[in-house]
Amino acid sequence: MEHTNIAAKPRIGTALSEKRGMEQSLRNSELRYRRLFESAQDGILILDVETGSISDVNPYLIQMLGYSREEFLEKKLWEVGSFRDVQASRDSFLALQKDQFIRYDNLPLKTKSGRLIQVEFVSNVYLVGDEKVIQCNIRDVSDRKRAEAAVQAKDEAQWSLIENLEDLWLLIKQLPVGVVVHTPDTKIVLCNPEASQILGVASELMLGRDACDPEWNFQREDGSPLPADQHPVNRVIATGATMKSFVMRIARGGNGAPTWVLVNAYPQLDQDQALRQVVVTYSDVSDMKGAENVIRRHLEHLTALVEIDRAINFSFDLDLSLTTLLTHLMVQLGIDAADVLLFNPATRTMEYLAGRGFHSKAIEQPREPLGAGEARWGAQDAGIVHLPDLAKGDDKFLGGIDLAGEEFVGYFAVPLVAKGEVIGVLEVFQRTQQVHAAEWLDLLKALASKAAIAIDNATLFENLQRSNTELAQAYDATIEGWSRAMELRDNMTEGHTQRVADLTLKLARLFGIGDDQLVQVRWGALLHDIGKMGIPDGILLKQGELTPTEWAVMKKHTVFAYEMLSPIRYLRLALDIPCYHHERWDGTGYPFGLKGEQIPLVARIFAVADVWDALRSDRHYRGSWPVAKVRQHLQVRSGTHFDPQVIKVCLESGLLSD
């Protein structure tokens, strides 16, 4: 018995020691778990397996979702905002209560701030001591998902690019624009059929060629060679910048017209921004350039015609009009010489009127009388005469003149027709053989028409001038006749009217009266006493003093002058002298008693000239006065009878000195 009791004591001590060890081990295990729980880089939720309430939450999940610890604890999982919209959360809890494993690989959760994150959600049931708990591990996989999506998109893009390269090349082959791809050393590595056609080399022969291969003979727009460093490919390589809308010409030899191309060049860079290749597009714009040249020529022609019209319409100088016309004709038509001949109906010859571009004056000789060629220039058939080769001797239209030194080859003659009649010929000469299009011939006809208009206008103007001169001479002769008739009737000193008219004109020029007005001044001076034609002879020719009644009648001659001359339209501007030459500066004159500058200036000037000539002439009732006495007489009456300024200018001019 005793032996048994002694042996039992050590066994009890050992059991107690083991129990304490196990408890310590459990405490250590719980401590390690707590440390792991608190420091884990995944969110962790602990749920009560019976109620589903959250009994614990680690700091990482609090930070991830933005809720406080208080907003988690003692809440059902689906009562927390982030899990409220997760329909599976209730089902998941029920499954976990049955010891089932739950996993979601891509579960979307909203943080408290509303930001959406993608998480992996893994739930398991664990036995902690004698109790079951549910542990939910929540890992934020948003960055990983984005990275995976980017990789997938890149892979898909690469595969798409590879799959579409063939389709892209098929598209490039069908483009109506030439496409050429160059390496950074300008070598061609790709060329579509359109580019091959534009550059004139088969596609298979294009590969490996340099961008500036001399065979293409690239030129600037003006036809000069294009330097290699100015080629679009080399400029892109040198600058790294896109070059757009560069126009150049390709002249590949032969006599064919050059090809005009519009070039665009684009650099393509790799991921390190280094030049990988240069893509060049070529567009054949030859048709457009041709149309542009046609428009430009038409504009030049139109401008020339406008300038010729201006010369014709704003000047009646025939030499100036024809010089302008021939200058434009030689420039626009590209000919070597041209002249204009005028038909003289009296001699039936063509006479030289104007010309340019000739080496000698042989062309200026009058032509022989027109023979059979004249019918070709009839008004009913005014066509162009063309002699393509004067060396063959077909020169009947040249009238036998010797032009051997001129070395002309081609010849055109266009009749100048005005009002249905041939008035002359426009001749055009060329020293080289040329072929002309219809446009050239149309312009030649248009210029010939302008020459005919210029000649016709100048002729009309010359005839009009002649008619006006003759008419003016007739007017003048008529007025002088009236003035002489008045002198004869009035027994006035012969020549008084003519002298006073001449003196009035000289004095009027001192006051700046222009030539266009002087004609009317002269006519007014010649007709200053025309009103006396209405005065009865008994009063006009009376030798003695006039009675007041007779004098009142005599004063009416100024009114009679107005009544006689005003109906004559061309004499209306000449009325100032006949009507107002008896008005006085102080207002005591007649017929209206005008005063000072109310009296027309020409009437004030004429009054001085009239008195000067009257006092310097002999009359039947007195002799002529000496110069000094007449000058003194005028000076004394300055300011009463006469305008003081007019008297001053006239006396100082020296015209009133003999």
Image (tube, rainbow, N blue to C red):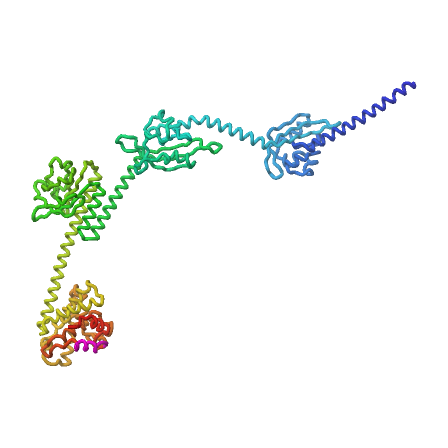
- Which residue is more in the foreground, 238 or 79? 238
Q: Is residue 416 magenta?
A: no
Question: Which quadrant would residue 212 be assigned to in this image?
Answer: top left
**Position of 614 relative to 134 (above/below):** below
Q: Is residue 637 magenta?
A: yes
Where's the N terminus, which quadrant? top right
Please provide percent x and percent y for residue 633.
18, 78
Residue at horizontal 15%, vertical 53%?
460
Residue at horizontal 24%, vertical 46%?
304
Magenta stretch?
628-639
Residue at horizontal 27%, vertical 30%?
254
Question: Is residue 75 visible to the viewer in this orientation of the structure?
Answer: yes
Please provide percent x and percent y for residue 180.
38, 30
Please provide percent x and percent y for residue 172.
39, 29
- Which residue is more in the foreground, 434 or 19? 434
Please provide percent x and percent y for residue 243.
39, 37
Question: Which quadrant would residue 47 be assigned to in this image?
Answer: top right
In this image, 106 relative to 657: left or right? right
